[in-house]
């Protein structure tokens, strides 16, 4: 079943792959659009296929391939498996209204909270001011009334939601992390030019501050950090991972089955190698020390463990000792007309605060995978992998995988018509929206429990 | 007398002017050095000659031409004259030790405090970390034990000293103000290139945050703001003035004896002109309104008043409404060898924590304006305007202008020898340092009164 549903996505990926084969992939976090996901592996994103199989109660966004890629998810799995602390950081841009595309992030956060993650959520109010013109007060109102209320209604339990403008650690890190980057590097990653607004230039640094501040001792300390994002956010992730590494005294890498530990600077090399050597001994690993190469090679393949231990030691020396954050990547939900779902195109997005009648009207106008006539549909069968209604089912409107599978098959066979699917979608959406509305009413009084 | 002392500086300026006539002036706040001060007027710095004459009890740094330039000092004079609130903002870089060159800033601050200014002092701890590698804790220790203790010992009364890393308003403004600048502009002002560290790129924005945050309602509100700086800091001042202006809805300029008020954007033009028109009426000024030009011309030469009134109105509309900060510029004190005085060259700087014996030794080695032999000195006379000892006298070691003048004349006539001057300087310095040391002891317990 899981296999089956994944195959849908794989087919669609291959289709995309063919049609976009010659296009350059340029990931731009400020202009989201659909990507040739298959090609993203070139950037170092790994496929998220088996990583989740032994996690507790795998949710629909894993089973149905919505979360399709990752970086260093093994650090998170290891923490879950060994019941060690780990943390999830996500953010919200307080602008416009929350739509089904935003929901998929919170679905993930709620799952991670349930299986033991410490949850931190940044309200990007500084970014909202700087790049979208909202005042901090407007941003606070939108964040609270629109986003946080819906998060609670969707099932988020009390956690740490904070406003960038009120979080000193984040703001400090934004400035401080800048020390290890120069203009050329930032410009290359983000495509900045001379006419780029400086508020855009600052944004990645604040986001790196968001992601890394949860590793500060004051905010829970050093632990594996997961950032679940849409794939358009990967430049931020790569940038933040680079920044984290650049603040380390050691680099720790896998080398032919061994773990290579290298002192990065030229200061205190001997002392730093002594520390690494001590760790090797404590763990009982065979090792080879080479002072001339500023290196120690340990006979262990557990790179993460050594990296983590060394980061702890770096903190004792007064350094930041960040470990590189992990990330997962989810597909964007498509707008009802087949293009991007966005607040700026309200007729093609379903908002969590839509009245059921509105939502139903939009659903009835949605693009489907149906044929041009009932007759043709019956004859040739539908194309669920091109159908926005089917996508809505996949993104959680239908909970049961068997039910989803049956619709897929019946559509392919031409036995399920678009009218039937739209009717079902409209009915499920109505139930969902009505239920959510009720829960929002209850949520309003509980917001304080969520704010740091 | 005042005239006389200024003439010394004027001669020295002319000399500089001749020798440097063909050099390009490039003001670089990160590499201070002596400038061709005369040429600075090309950048819009006005000579500070008569501005101070009717201020209460003019201090030595005015009388002796140490403060030599300004921008918009008339706003400050007007506030003093009309007993309106005004504010002084200065900053300290918590690195190294405080020397006589740093003292001249605090001399000014203490004077302004005495004549009624609200004093705010930024400890640039974020900048110290980002550009000089101090941790925030190290910076705090240096700021408190070295700088603030000396400030109190020198006579500063309780005021608002804050750490950048602990001041949310400053940090927010740093990010928020960035909205109105792009990379090309910042690069042009500061000479940034691709290899410029991003922490350097952020620094001017934090400094603009420092300067403008004192105009926020929470910190005393809209009022004339004076930033007394060394001339190498002028790029920051210009940048901050530009940033302040760019956050305004109106531009207000003198036009042929009238005040021209222009609406900058294309939104709400009529409403904004209505507001300006109302102000003209309230003040009883004749005016000419031209909606097509988005302008109102008022028959008043009091540009500042109109600018201030409009800034107040902008705030009512939810905007920042900053008024451009004023600044004064002081000369750098010279190191004892005739080059720059700097913490990095401790043998040629006198530190406020030097033991009198150390200071005296340095003074005895200092470069003077004396001739190569006593005989020649007696015959041709000395050159006080080339003498570092004389400069120390001028920078406050000798309080009395008549005494200073006598030394100048006696030196020129060859009647005062370098030995006599050094002996006097050593004695005065010893008294000053001993007295200061005693006051530092008392100051230590009072630091809390100064921190916000």
Image (tube, coloured by chain):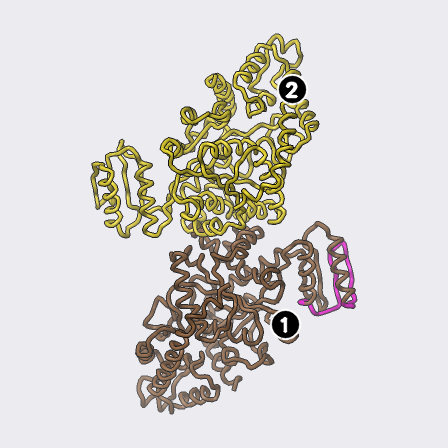
Chain colours: A yellow, B brown
x, y percentage for residue A442? 62, 36
Residue that lies at the very extreme toward the top in this rendered image = A379
Residue B286 within the segment the image draws in magenta:
yes
Of residues B449 and B316, the one nearer the viewer is B449
Q: Secondary structure at mark 2?
A: helix
Left or right, residue A180 beside residue B212: left
Q: Which residues are magenta?
A: B283-304
Establish if B401 lies above or below A329: below
Which residue position is annotated with label 1? B79
Left or right, residue A164 beside residue A433: left
Residue A411 within the segment the image draws in magenta:
no
Q: Give the residue drawn at x 44%, y 89%.
A: B406
Q: Label 2 marks which chain's residue?
A: A
Which residue position is annotated with label 2? A422
> Is residue B387 in view from this perspective?
no
Q: How many residues crowd mark 1 within 10 Å: few (<14), some (14–19), many (20+)?
A: some
């Amino acid at each position: 079943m899981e296999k089956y549903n994944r195959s849908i996505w794989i087919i669609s990926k291959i289709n995309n792959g063919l049609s976009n084969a010659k296009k350059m992939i340029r990931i731009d976090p400020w202009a989201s659009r659909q990507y040739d996901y298959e090609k993203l592996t070139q950037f170092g994103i790994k496929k998220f296929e088996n990583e989740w199989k032994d996690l507790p109660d795998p949710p629909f966004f894993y089973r149905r391939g919505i979360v399709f890629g990752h970086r260093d998810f093994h650090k998170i799995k290891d923490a879950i498996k060994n019941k060690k602390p780990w943390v999830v950081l996500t953010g919200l841009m307080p602008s416009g209204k929350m739509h089904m595309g935003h929901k998929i992030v919170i679905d993930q956060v709620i799952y991670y909270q349930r299986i033991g993650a410490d949850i931190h959520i940044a309200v990007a109010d500084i970014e909202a001011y700087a790049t979208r013109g909202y005042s901090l007060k407007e941003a606070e109102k939108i964040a609270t009334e629109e986003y946080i209320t819906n998060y609670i209604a969707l099932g988020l339990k009390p956690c740490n939601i904070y406003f960038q403008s009120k979080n000193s650690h984040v703001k400090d890190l934004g400035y401080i992390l800048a020390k290890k980057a120069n203009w050329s590097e930032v410009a290359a990653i983000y495509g900045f030019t001379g006419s780029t607004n400086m508020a855009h230039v600052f944004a990645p640094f604040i986001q790196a501050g968001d992601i890394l501040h949860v590793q500060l001792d004051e905010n829970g300390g050093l632990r594996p950090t997961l950032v679940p994002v849409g794939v358009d956010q990967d430049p931020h992730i790569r940038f933040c991972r680079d920044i984290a590494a650049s603040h380390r005294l050691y680099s720790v890498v896998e080398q032919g089955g061994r773990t290579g530990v290298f002192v990065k600077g030229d200061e205190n090399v001997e002392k730093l190698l002594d520390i690494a050597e001590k760790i090797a001994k404590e763990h009982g690993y065979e090792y080879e020390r080479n002072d001339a190469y500023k290196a120690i090679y340990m006979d262990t393949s557990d790179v993460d463990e050594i990296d983590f231990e060394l980061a702890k030691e770096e903190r004792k020396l007064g350094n930041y000792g960040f470990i590189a954050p992990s990330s997962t990547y989810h597909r964007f939900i498509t707008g009802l007309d087949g293009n991007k779902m966005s607040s700026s195109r309200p007729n093609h997005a379903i908002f969590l605060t839509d009245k059921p009648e509105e939502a139903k009207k939009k659903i009835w106008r949605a693009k489907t995978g149906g044929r041009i006539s009932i007759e043709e549909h019956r004859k040739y069968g539908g194309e669920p992998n091109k159908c926005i209604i089917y996508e809505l089912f996949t993104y959680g409107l239908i909970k049961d995988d068997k039910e989803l599978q049956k619709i897929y098959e019946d559509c392919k066979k031409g036995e399920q018509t678009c009218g039937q699917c739209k009717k079902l979608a409209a009915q499920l959406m109505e139930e969902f929206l009505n239920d959510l509305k009720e829960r929002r009413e209850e949520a309003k009084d509980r917001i304080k429990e969520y704010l740091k």
